[in-house]
Every structure is written in structure tokens, then in C-alpha cells.
Amino acid sequence: MFAYVFERFPSFTQTFCAREVAALRGLGIDAPVFSIRNPKEEPIHQMFPNLGETAYLPENFDEVLAGDADFRRSARKAQEDLVKLWGGESEKRRIYEALWLERAFRSAGITHIHTHFAGLSARTAFWLERLGGPTYSVTAHANDIFRDEPPERLAQVLGGARQVVTVSDFSKSYLLKNFPQLQEKLHRVYNGIDLSRFSRSSFPEHKPLIVSVGRAIEKKGFPDLIAACALIRDRDFECVILGGGPMEEELRNQVVQAGVGHRVQICGAASEEEIRGYLARARAFVLPCVTGQDGAMDNLPTVIMEAMASGLPVVATPLAGIPEMVVDGVTGFLVPEHS
């Protein structure tokens, strides 16, 4: 029997995780889902009503440590191993999570777990197996391999996995270049979407609509889209950018300063239903991804798949796995980042 372990589930910005669990449920595979953190401050995924129950780990392990001597002794011993392997105690909560999960999985008969992202939840899975728990596999995505994890720790976490999945040929090549020892267990499996959930755009004859979707963060490149709209402000069109995030106010200020308030709207977070509605009446989808100053980079943005499912031409940049979706001059156009 296998289970999922997520850092947070269901996360509003990680629809591909919820989609995968829902698809398995639809196939009659009822794999239990465990989440290290509770995304209680995030909107609820209304489009996936059949996700089932999620078991959440304790937010604070102080009571567990205070009331369970065996847990406390096991944690102390494992932390000595942690310091030797990773050089410090900054990850000691991974030990608590691993010990808590080991007990839960032993009683449930779970022998293997799968986790998305080679980050926090994968580090917990690494220690879970090291402490005698189930084996694990990992799906690696973007920042978790391009930026967030130190190479030596990433090598240990991916090296300990029974199988490693990544979502584009680009990221597979990247991982093999940096970790050739993964050759025999690394697989490329594209994320997918349910095409039936998306209506093809009717390309309505009213004012042309450009749509863009993504978190308001540097790597999405939204300032370049606003600047591009400013170049054609005298044409009759509108552009909506959907998705909240830390740069949202900065983008609104840029719209005002560029004098395109009558053309560009920064709309904040939107549900899948709202996004589908915008796509169905759009003329084009634009996602001007860039490489962040810290090396952050998108890999295979799901929103591009959703736009293509709506029959829209896509304008994007040729970063990471994007050219594996957008065929330049056929299904859209690829232009240099920051152009």
C-alpha cells in the first residue's frame, strides 16, 4: 500500500497535485494523503470535490516530545545523525515529522510513499526511510531543483529515492547533467490536464482580450507584459493578469505609471472556473517567464496547457520545458525573455 506525503495539500497554487490525486481516486486507487502543513489560509479547491480526507501532521511537536519518552529518545538519537549528515540542527523538525509518520504508516501497512517537489516533504521522506519507515519516490518540478536545495543535499534526497520523476525533458537533462547517478531511475512524465474541463475560445469579435495567469512573482515576467502593452496602448484591446502574490501592488503601480490603466487589469487570485471563463473569451494567452535574479525559473507551467486546451495561441519565452509545449510559429510564438 502506498500513500502521498505533501508539504501542504491541497495548495491553491499546485493544482497539478490535486489533479493527480483526484485522477487516482477516479481510477479507484484510494491512496491516503498526508500533509505536513495545513494550507488553511488558502482558498479551497472547489474544482476537485473528490479529494477525500487529508491527514495533517501536528503543527507543533512540543506536546508529543513532552509526553512520549520513546519519541523523545528516538528524536534525540536521529538528530545526532542529522548533524553529522547535514551539518546542523536546522532541519530537526524533519526528524519529528518522520518519526510521527513512521508510526502512522506502520499501523496502516503503508510500505511506500510518493511526494511532489524535492524540497521539504522529500527531505522528510528521506529521513522517514532512514529511520526504518517506507521507501519513497519523488516528483521534481522547478525551483526545488533549479534553486532551493543545496546540490549535496539534493543528491542525497534524490539518491535515496526508489524512483525520481520530473516533468520535462529539460529538467531531466538538467538532473542527469548534475546527478548522473540517477540515470537508471529518472523518468520524464509530463503533467496532464482534463481537456473536457476547458471550452475552446470562440475568438469573439468584441475588444480583443489578452490573458495571463500566474503568481505575482519575479519569474513570471509580468512587468515585461505590462511594458509591451504600453507600446500598443493606442490599439483597442484589454489585458488581464490573474494571480495574487507579493508583487501584486508593484504591478498595479507599474500599470498606473505606464499609463495603461485603461488597457491592463491586475485581478489578483482567481479560481479555475474564473480562469476558464477568461480563456474562453480570449484572443491570446501570454506568459513572459524570465529567469529570476536568484535563479528561480518556471519549468512546465500548467497555465500554458490550460490555454492550449482552450485553443488559444500562446506567446511565451523559450525557458526550460516551455518549448516542449509551445511550437514556435505553430501553436504560438517564443520570444527572448525580457523582450
Image: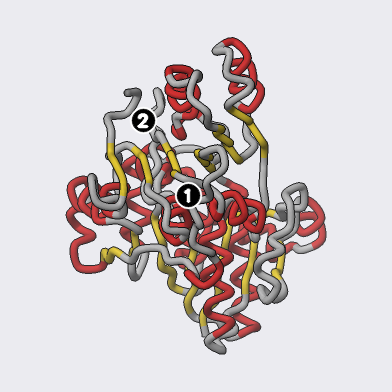
Image-based side of 319 in relation to 95, left or right: left
Identify the image quadrant of the C terminus. top left
**Residue 257, located in which quarter of the rendered image?**
top right
- Residue type pointed to by label 2: Thr
- Give percent across and percent down for residue 226: 50, 23
- Give percent across and percent down for residue 86: 43, 43
Residue lying at the far front in this picture: please name it.
Answer: 205
Q: How busy is the neighbourhood of tag 2: few (under 14 within 10 Å), some, or many (20 plus)?
A: some
Q: Is residue 302 visible?
A: yes
Residues under labels 1 and 2: Cα distance?
20 Å
What residue is rendered at 31% in x and 46% in y? 332
Picture layout, residue 237 above or below residue 169 = above
Q: How busy is the neighbourhood of tag 1: few (under 14 within 10 Å), some, or many (20 plus)?
A: many
- Residue type pointed to by label 1: Gly
Image-based side of 117 in relation to 279, left or right: left
Image-based side of 59 in relation to 247, left or right: right
Residue closest to the eye, 195 or 57: 195
- Give percent across and percent down for residue 38: 72, 55
Would you name the residue on which mark 2 appears? 291
Would you name the residue on which mark 1 appears? 119
Secondary structure under tag 1 reads loop
Q: Is residue 212 visible?
A: no
Q: Which numbered disc, 1 or 2, marks the residue closer to the eye?
A: 2
What residue is rendered at 66% in x and 52% in y? 274
What residue is rendered at 59% in x and 71% in y? 102
